[in-house]
């Protein structure tokens, strides 16, 4: 891990006080804006953490609803890929390198076989990603506005936004260097893919799964 003193950071002296953060541990890491890729990749935690040009961003902890939806979609996509395609369907935590100094952790990632070259590292880009939108304005902004621009820039062919609050699934497909909206799928409809034309999911079944039910 890079030294925090390289940018004239001096570790302060803190007296341990019950109920306060362990600031000494925080001081072992770089300040925001000074993180390097090696620092980010060396973090030993199962928290969802993303990396953006020297800054790290800690994502909200998944809820049961979030995990139920992820499991439902992963089961369906893995079965489809097993029968009709090749490649790998993976879930977070898994940092995906979008470009230099930029990592995201999509909830669900599909990788073609030719992307899996070094299994003891992180994938360079992806072919399809899915995000389940967490509660809160910041999370919605990230998944619905920021990430479409980033994933398109990274050349990811397809991006699914699964939005429990609006009970809808938005599918973006890469066209040139930007995304077009393939479809916004709401209640009573079936969400479809461009990358995998025969893959589809019932929107109602997705959100029923999120509630621990069957549609």
Image (cartoon, rainbow, N blue to C red):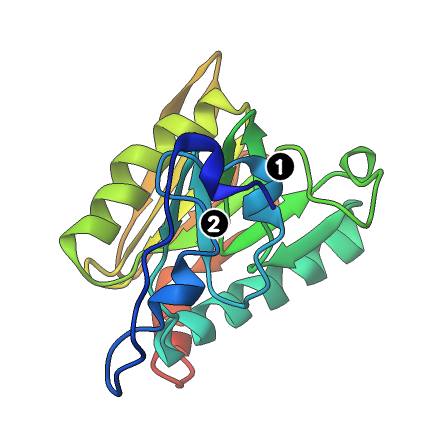
Q: State whether residue 40 is above or below residue 150.
A: below
The answer to whether one can see residue 181 in this image is no
Per the image, label 2 sits on a secondary structure element best described as strand
Quarter of the image for residue 204 reads bottom left
**Front-most of 79 and 36?**
36
Q: Is residue 133 left or right of residue 28?
A: left
The location of residue 72, given as percent across then percent down, is 52, 70
Considering every residue shown, the one lying at the far left of the view is 137
Structural crowding at the residue carrying mark 1, measured as other residues with C-alpha within 10 Å and reported as few (<14), some (14–19) or many (≥20) = many
Which dot marks residue 33? none
**Front-most of 74 and 9?**
9
Please name the residue shown 78% across and 55% down the image: 83
Which dot marks residue 130? 2
Please name the residue shown 54% across and 42% down the image: 3
Residues at marks 2 and 1, CA–CA distance in whole angstroms: 11 Å
Per the image, label 1 sits on a secondary structure element best described as loop
**Front-most of 31 and 154?**
31
Please name the residue shown 46% across and 21% down the image: 153
The location of residue 65, given as percent across then percent down, is 36, 76
Please name the residue shown 77% across and 46% down the image: 87
The location of residue 185, given as percent across then percent down, is 31, 49
Which residue has dot 1 on it? 126
Structural crowding at the residue carrying mark 2, measured as other residues with C-alpha within 10 Å and reported as few (<14), some (14–19) or many (≥20) = many
Q: Is residue 31 left or right of residue 192?
A: left
Q: Are marks 2 and 1 in contact (CB under 8 Å)?
A: no
So how many labels did they put on this image?
A: 2
**Front-most of 15 and 29?**
15
The answer to whether one can see residue 5 in this image is yes
Quarter of the image for residue 69 reads bottom left
The location of residue 143, given as percent across then percent down, is 32, 45
Quadrant into which the C terminus falls:
bottom left
Q: State whether residue 101 is above or below residue 57.
A: above
């Amino acid at each position: 891990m890079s030294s925090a003193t390289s940018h004239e950071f001096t570790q302060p002296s803190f007296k341990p006080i019950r109920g306060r953060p362990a600031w000494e541990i925080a001081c072992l890491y770089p300040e925001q804006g000074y993180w390097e890729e090696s620092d980010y990749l060396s973090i030993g935690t199962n928290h969802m953490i993303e990396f953006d040009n020297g800054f790290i961003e800690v994502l909200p902890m998944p809820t049961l609803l979030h995990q139920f939806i992820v499991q439902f979609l992963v089961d369906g996509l893995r079965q489809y890929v097993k029968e009709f395609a090749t490649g790998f369907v993976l879930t977070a935590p898994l940092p995906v390198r979008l470009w230099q100094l930029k990592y995201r952790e999509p909830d669900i990632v599909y990788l073609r076989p030719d992307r899996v070259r070094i299994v003891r590292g992180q994938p360079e880009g992806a072919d399809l990603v899915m995000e389940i939108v967490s509660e809160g304005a910041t999370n919605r902004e990230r998944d619905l506005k920021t990430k479409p621009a980033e994933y398109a820039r990274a050349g990811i062919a397809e991006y699914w936004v699964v939005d429990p609050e609006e009970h809808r699934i938005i599918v973006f497909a890469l066209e040139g260097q930007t995304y077009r909206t393939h479809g916004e799928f709401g209640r009573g409809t079936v969400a479809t893919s461009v990358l995998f034309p025969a893959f589809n999911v019932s929107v109602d079944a997705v959100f029923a799964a999120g509630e621990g039910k069957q549609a």
